[in-house]
Amino acid sequence: LETSPPPAETDVYGVFTLPAVYGLEVLSDGDLIVVGIHSWSDRSGRKRNLSRVYRISPQGQRVAAWPQDGPADATLRFPRIDEPSGLMVLPVDRSAEGPPPPTELPLDGIQVLRLADLSPEYSFLNPPLAPHFEHATVWEALDIDGARRRVLVGFGDGRIQWVRMNGEARQTFDLGTPIVSGEVPIAASLGWAHVLSGGGFVTNSGRSNIPWGSAVTATRPPVAHPGENTLWAYGPDGELLWSWSGGAMVQGISLSPSERFLVLGGGPRETD
């Protein structure tokens, strides 16, 4: 994925410009699924992206890679694995300068790959939620239900959707989508989600925010979004089972293998 010059000592975000692994999963046969990403400014100052997914054997040999013809001019990260169905899923976006080269990549979308050889199985684009958002950004609110041929995808705009791998209409849950207070849009992004074995899912939202790029001059939300810092559990047919919101700002979801227990990261709520 090439190299880049060391960042300045004063650049607190400089570490994120170096080549790194943004996804590491161990399969039952000992193989690794690794997602490498490099997003940096080259010596001419031009912003560039290179990313690739690898399947690596316990002996360190490359079993497969995607894209097959070399790294993508895009950013790939945080794969989610459904080993019984032989599928994996990951988001695809791009922050490099200039128009993207001709490609079959689902930029601003989702790619499903076959685990055996990392060949494409299905892909789809994520339309942004107008008028407040220009992109439908996905962080780690992504999972795959291979048995039912569907993908769970949550967005920074507060939506989470079931997307079937046959082109059927999406099932959408508006948990943190923007409300308007005065003239200020306020959202609560969904950063994490997991599919449950019975076909339901859990997801959680973060703090209230004003959509990036909004034309309003306010720098902080004037009121809290009613869906901020909340954990939801839904059943297989889309019914709400329960929700929880405490006094903390929550991030991340970790499930026990039995799915009887769930751990959230929590900390003090940010205030003015």
Image (spheres, rainbow, N blue to C red):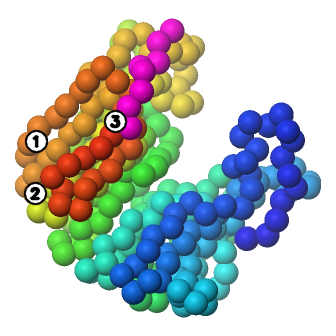
Mark 3, secondary structure of its residue: strand
In this rendering, does residue 187 appear at all? no
Task: Give the residues in magenta.
Answer: 265-272
Residue linked to disc 1:
240
Viewer-closest of 180 and 84: 84
Mark 1, secondary structure of its residue: strand
Q: Residue at x 10, y 42 (%)?
A: 240
Viewer-closest of 118 and 122: 118
The kind of residue on which mark 3 rests is Ser
Distance from the alpha carbon under mark 1 to that under mark 3: 15 Å
Residue linked to disc 3:
205
Tell me the number on the disc at residue 183: none
**In the drawing, does residue 59 fall left or right of residue 143?**
right
Tell whether position 229 is magenta.
no
Q: Residue at x 72, y 61 (%)?
A: 19
Q: Say whether disc 1 or disc 3 marks the residue closer to the N-terminus.
A: 3
